[in-house]
Amino acid sequence: MARFDPDLPLDRRHALAGNVPLPEKTEGAVLFADIAGFTPLTASLARDLGAQRGAEELNRLLTEVYTVLISCTHAFRGSVIHFGGDSITCWFDDWPVAGAPDLPDGAGRAVAAAFAMQTAMAPFGTIQTLTGSTVSVGLKVAITAGDVRRFLVGQEEVQLIEVLAGRLLDRMAAAEAAARQGEIVVGAEVLGRFGPALVVEAWRGERGGQAGRSDFFAVVRRNAEVPGAWPPAAPWPETALPIAAGSERWVLAVIRRRIRESEDAFLAELRRTTSVFLSFGGLDYDQDPEAGKKLNDYITWVQTVFSRFEGHLLQVTIGDKGSYLLGVFGAPIAHEDDPLRAVSAARALLVPAERLEFITHTRIGISQGITYVGNYGSPNRLTLGAQGNETNIAARLMQQAAPGQIVVSAQVADATRHAFALESLDAVTLKGVAQPLPVFAVGGRRRRHIGDQLKGRALAPIIGRNAEK
């Protein structure tokens, strides 16, 4: 039978195997590792090798890099909680682990893992593809420490999703924004745990930075003159875990079915998809004891809306100031009218159901183009994702949108203007995009009962994982 265990964070796998619940409130360190270089590669591989061979080559390169990063995380008893395009968010818990009572705290292990990542990534500075072209891959890491809440949200019959939530995630995002390629940036609360073992190369912050201030971040390197300051590797136990009961619930339902029905071992594609990025607010994850229930209610409703239009929710990223989600139309199942489905779903999501009136400031960005669709990660930790420049554009259009507004790219506008009124907005200049992009705000329907018109032909599905029979 297929094994779905790699879709679970490693600490969750151990918890399920030992029938031990993970606490909702916990302390430790969050590590965010961001890879630069893969997004522009997607389009060039599709152009030079074609959709299928291009996808296989991109999958090979992604696997090489992510295997290194994930191995460093697991080597210091961390867990990859979330994949977000070209990044991973990892959690290092403070609590003692069975069999390792003297394990350093989460911040100590996270910093050790970050330096291990930096060393292991050195050979990937320049990668050569099958076409003979080269791509430069860079890494930056941000680490903060403190309290978080950890939730498991979503419908079991659709997909369970792991999330970390709270102000610590906002601090992590601020630290990441302050970091540059090749750097490790830590919060002051992390720096204080190492003394002279860490050398501060620079302070970063809105007002220039100041040593010891909790709202500033330090660019750090190891002090080689302080021996014994770094915790040794303390990997997760290597004893084989039993297949975690119920682990298939962490896998998108349509993928579960395809894996069980298909003999194909793996299939990843470069295909045209429509990406929907949505940001929202209104939840206090640190102070509201009902925040977990409220978030679950919202996410299950979002899953229902996406499913109604045959799209899929792929990612949920939570922060007090910046919570957002990514949905995709065109994978794993594609339709000829995916842009129309995406905009129809976005309009339904713009005004949450009455029972979800606590959700505020909904903003949505939608774009269409060639993306890599398939599994990426390592043999020990996988996710199904949609990566590419158009996905990034959808995220940036979301940031451009006003609360209560849907902003779409020209491709989406062209495909949906027969069904919806569109308002041309000022062209926007986006990071990584050479020319200003024409963008449009979605207004009302041009005719009633649009949902009845969603009859586009279903195209070939994909299967996004290794299946073990």
Image: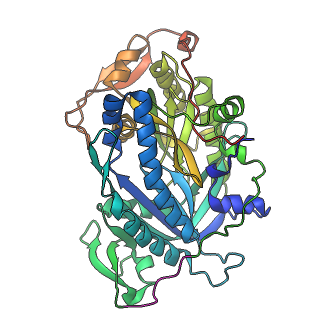
Color encoding of the figure = rainbow
- The outermost residue toward the left is 435
**From the viewer's perspective, is 142 left or right of 265?**
left
Q: Is residue 367 visible?
A: no
Q: Is residue 427 above or below residue 281?
A: above
Corner quadrant of residue 299 = top right
Which is nearer the eye, 453 or 229? Answer: 229
Query: Residue 141 placed where, x, y %?
Result: 39, 64
Q: Is residue 405 above or below residue 358?
A: above
Query: Residue 45 placed where, x, y %?
Result: 34, 35
Corner quadrant of residue 76 = bottom right
In magenta segment, residue 228: yes
Q: Residue at x 67, y 29 (%)?
A: 262
Of helix, strand and loop, which mostly describes the magenta segment?
Answer: loop
Q: In which quadrant will I find the N terminus?
A: top right
Chain part drawn in magenta: 226-233
Q: Residue at x 60, y 75 (%)?
A: 94
Query: Residue 18 placed where, x, y %?
Result: 78, 64
Q: In which quadrant will I find the C terminus?
A: top right
**From the viewer's perspective, is 411 left or right of 244?**
left
Q: Residue at x 69, y 58 (%)?
A: 13
